[in-house]
Amino acid sequence: MKSDPVVSVVRLNGMIASGPRGLNDQGVAGMIEKAFGKGKPKAVALVINSPGGSPAQSSLIGARIRRLADEKDVPVYAFVEDVAASGGYWLASAADEIYVDPTSVVGSIGVISAGFGLHGLIEKYGVERRVYTAGTSKSMNDPFKPENPEDVARLKTILEQLHETFKAQITGSRGDKLADRDLFTGEIWVGQKAVEVGLADGVAHLVPKMKDQFGDKVQFRVYGQKKPLLARLGARVLDDTLDSLEERALRAQFGL
C-alpha cells in the first residue's frame, strides 16, 4: 500500500546561544537528525522564529541541516514566523527555499558587539581594579578600564571576519536570487519586501505550501527542542529570567 507523503517539521524558536536555554547545535542535533532520518520524509520544513545570537552556533546548526539534506537527498523549506534576523536568518539560509508571512521581519545580516564602560563608575566609588595577565591582549576591552584604541581596532577586525563569513553563507545559499544591491548592512525587510530583494522566495505558510507541493494527504511529523528536566520542573528561575530579558532585548531591535 502506498503511504501518504510525510513532511518533518522542525521548530527553531528563540535566541541562538550555547548552554541549556538557547538554540544551539548540541541542543537541536537530536531532533534534526530524527527529522531527516525517521522514515522517508518528502521534505523537512524549518519553522523559524529567532532574533539571532551566536554566530558559531548559527553556523553549526545551519551546517548540520545542509549536510543531512545533501546526504539524505531531502529538500528543506524554511518558514519564518515573527522574525529570522541575523543568526536567525543564517538558519533560514540553510534551506533550499525560504517563505515568510506578510509581517515577518527578515535580514539584519551583520555582526554586533555591545558592552559597557564602567571605569568611571568604580573610580567614583574608590574601587581599584587589579588585573594581572601573561599576554598583552589577554584583557582586551576590559569594561573596568578606559577604552583602548588598539583593542577597538582588534575587535573591529574580528567583527569584519565574522561578517565576511556571514556574507559568504548568504551569497552561497541564495546566489543569483539576491538583488543587485548591498544587502549586508544590517538592514531588515518585512514580508513581501524581503521577497523583492531576494532574501525570501515568497509569502506563504507551512501547511498550504506543503499541500500545494506534496498533495492534500501530506502528513506532518513535528519535532521540537526538549527543555532540560530542571527547567521543566520550574527550576533555574534566575537563568530563565536573564535569558528572557536578553532575548527580549534582541527582539526589541526589530520592533517585536
Image (tube, helix red, strand yellow):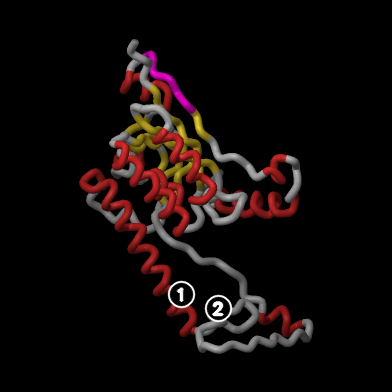
- Residue 218 inside the magenta-drawn segment: yes
At x 78%, y 86%, the residue is 126
Q: Which residue is mark 1?
A: 155
Residue 120 sits above or below residue 99 on the image: below
Q: Position of residue 234 (x, y in %)?
A: 75, 42
Q: Position of residue 27 (x, y in %)?
A: 54, 47
Helix, strand or loop at disc 2? loop
Which sits in the foreground, 75 or 249?
75
Circles 2, 1 touching at the beta carbon (< 8 Å): yes
* Residue type, label 1: Leu
Q: Is residue 86 visible?
A: no
Q: Which residue is mark 2?
A: 141
Residue 108 sits above or below residue 144 on the image: above
On screen, residue 116 versus residue 163, left or right, reads right
At x 38%, y 28%, the residue is 204
Which sits in the foreground, 92 or 190?
92
Q: Position of residue 158 (x, y in %)?
A: 42, 71
* Residue type, label 2: Asn
Considering every residue shown, the one lying at the far top of the view is 1
